[in-house]
Amino acid sequence: MPPPSSGGRWLPLLLVAAALALGWNLGGHRLLDPDEGRNAEVAREMALSNDYLVPHLNGLPYLDKPIVYFAAAAATMAVPCWSSWNTGIFMRSRSFFSM
């Protein structure tokens, strides 16, 4: 019987390294045009109107992405001090949890 793999002890270290790499300079960059800004605006309007069923952009329905995507982004914007940092943390957390 082969000995158990020691690869499991590296997993926490790799997860911390990935979190640091994704979170580095989180608020240092603006949102990339046009996609991140547009998606952030849709999520912001969703958070302000409390309408989590139909996303809107400039008052018109915007159905280019799944509603769950915008609802999750709007949930991060419900934090009292909204800024582009909140949107950045949502985008990077999606990348982190997809690993």
Image (spheres, grey):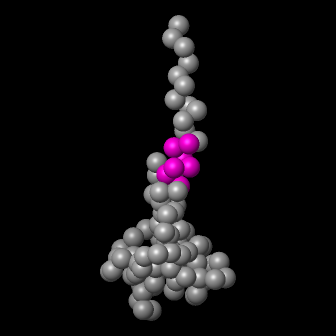
> How far across and down, in percent of the image, does residue 63 sit?
39, 76
- Residue bounds of the magenta highlight: 13-19
Residue drawn at x 33%, y 80% as measured from the top left:
33
Is residue 97 rendered to the left or right of residue 80? Answer: left
> How far across and down, in percent of the image, does residue 26 sit?
50, 70
Whether residue 58 appears in this view of the structure is: yes
The foreground one among 12 and 58 is: 12
Residue drawn at x 43%, y 76% as measured from the top left:
29
Decide whether the magenta segment is chiefly helix, strand or loop: helix
Residue lying furthest bottom: 59
User: Height in image: 89 above or below 18?
Assistant: below
Residue lying furthest top: 1
User: Height in image: 37 above or below 18?
Assistant: below
Is residue 41 rendered to the left or right of residue 48? Answer: left
Does the stretch in magenta take in 62? no
The foreground one among 6 and 67 is: 6
Question: Where, by quadrant of the figure, is residue 10 drawn?
Answer: top right
